[in-house]
Amino acid sequence: MRSEFELATARRRHWLRALGIVLAGGVLAWQSAEHHRVRDVSAASRHTLAAASHAALAALKEPVTATLYVPDTAPQRRIVAALVARYQEVKPDLRFVVTDPAKEPERVRRLGLREGELVLAAGERSERLVRFTEQDFTNALVRLAGKGERWLAFVTGHGERSPQRGANFDVTSWADALRKRGLRSLELDLATRPVIPDNTAVLVVASPQQAYLPGEITLIKDYLARGGNLLWLREPDEPADLKPLADAIGVARVGGTIVDPATQSLGVSNPALAIVSTYREHPLTQGFKALTIFPYATALQERPHERWTATRLFATGRQAWSETGEMNGNVAYDDGVDLPGPLALGIALTHELPAAQDRAAREQRVVVLGDGDFISNAFLGNQGNLELGMRCAEWLAAVDALITIETRVAPDVALNLKPWHMWVIGLGFLFVLPLAFLANGVLLWWRRRRA
């Protein structure tokens, strides 16, 4: 039998062990609170940010606010919160906010927001997301960081659409939306200042109504020869002196105005509105499915050119045609006179520029559209016109697909069973296991009866 001394010693050891366990737990709890450590042990490390995402966060010195506009009960809250949390591990000053659009209707209306959009803001710059993947989020951060300003230079002096005036014909609202995405606009009068600045990201020829001087055409062609990017908005009544520019690119304009009977099914009586609902697979139109409306548009035609690779972005339906007659009275298709659809409305051209001493290799880009009204102040709010206009400018300014992040998936997320496997599992759970439990119960009952 143990003595009182031995019992007291054992009790002291017991309490000391308990105190040691409590102290060790307290130290571990303090360490976990003060020094947060996370380790991704998932297959392919699919819960860890890629190196490109870390680089994007390192380049962004300002605090960032991510605001998700969804109702309080929306499932996107959890998905986006988990995505943002991964970035917050690297950038603690990244703040995540959820706002119910129904509670702030004036703000949503003023900013032109839609339910389900995520807005990233840093200073006066902002980016919008509707797809919540690491690649989309990281590319938005890269655009926010925006090393240097990107300028869209609008040629002026010939009745072009202006990014500064506020008439229905002009493109002020589009230019304001681009400014929020880091693309600034200026007007460039080549007649009084015959030079295109070197920091021009995109030169815009926006629906001129008057003839260009030969020297101005030469300046634009020289700009293209140096590798500049161009957005050209063409119209049915475009001046004929722009043909040398069209020949240099390889995109011809078809005479006439596009007529689209499909608009009648939408309750639109004006036959000169063309509807586009399908788009060619291209980085500019990737994932874009919205309806777009093009008023008083002209058809385009690709003409192969050794310098350029042309891609038709979108076209009218087969029921449309290019009307060469007067656009009044009873407008109808004249076989053998009018050109039937489908007719191209947007063409993208690319040219690979080799590396030089003063620049790395890159892709030169040109977009030619058969209409400028679709991004004018009068029509910008229709359907997907704004988004398409934004995509054109951003692709030309090379802010598309800035980073490609490989999709990382687990190798064992799918269970493939053969038919006999499913039979074994089904019979096992439905019959074998219940019978085994029943037999075990009967056996236990029989043993107890005999005991």
Image (cartoon, grey):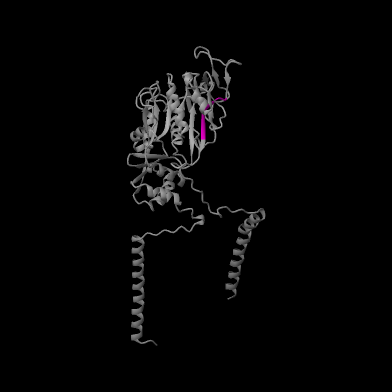
- Residue at image point 49% right, 55% down: 45
Q: How far across and down, in percent of the image, does residue 153 sit? A: 39, 30
Query: 274 or 268: nearer the eye?
Result: 274
Query: 58 or 291: nearer the eye?
Result: 58
Query: 278 or 192: nearer the eye?
Result: 192
Q: Quadrant of residue 320?
A: top right
Q: How far across and down, in percent of the image, does residue 126 sit? A: 37, 39
Q: How far across and down, in percent of the image, does residue 44 sit? A: 51, 55
Q: Is residue 344 magenta?
A: yes
Magenta: main secondary structure: strand
Determine the residue located farthest toward the top in the rendered image.
329
Above or below, 197 relative to 339: below
Magenta span of residues:
342-350
- Name the quarter where the C terminus is drawn: bottom right
Above or below, 176 relative to 319: below
Above or below, 109 relative to 431: above
Q: Quadrant of residue 11?
A: bottom left
Query: 290 or 186: nearer the eye?
Result: 186
Report the label total. 0
Q: Is residue 33 magenta?
A: no
User: Can residue 436 be seen in the rendering of this structure?
Assistant: yes
User: Can residue 133 be seen in the rendering of this structure?
Assistant: no
- Name the quarter where the N terminus is drawn: bottom left
Above or below, 56 relative to 22: above
- Horizontally, residue 81 falls left or right of residue 433, namely left
Q: How far across and down, in percent of the image, does residue 24 sit? A: 35, 69
Determine the residue located farthest toward the front in the rendered image.
357
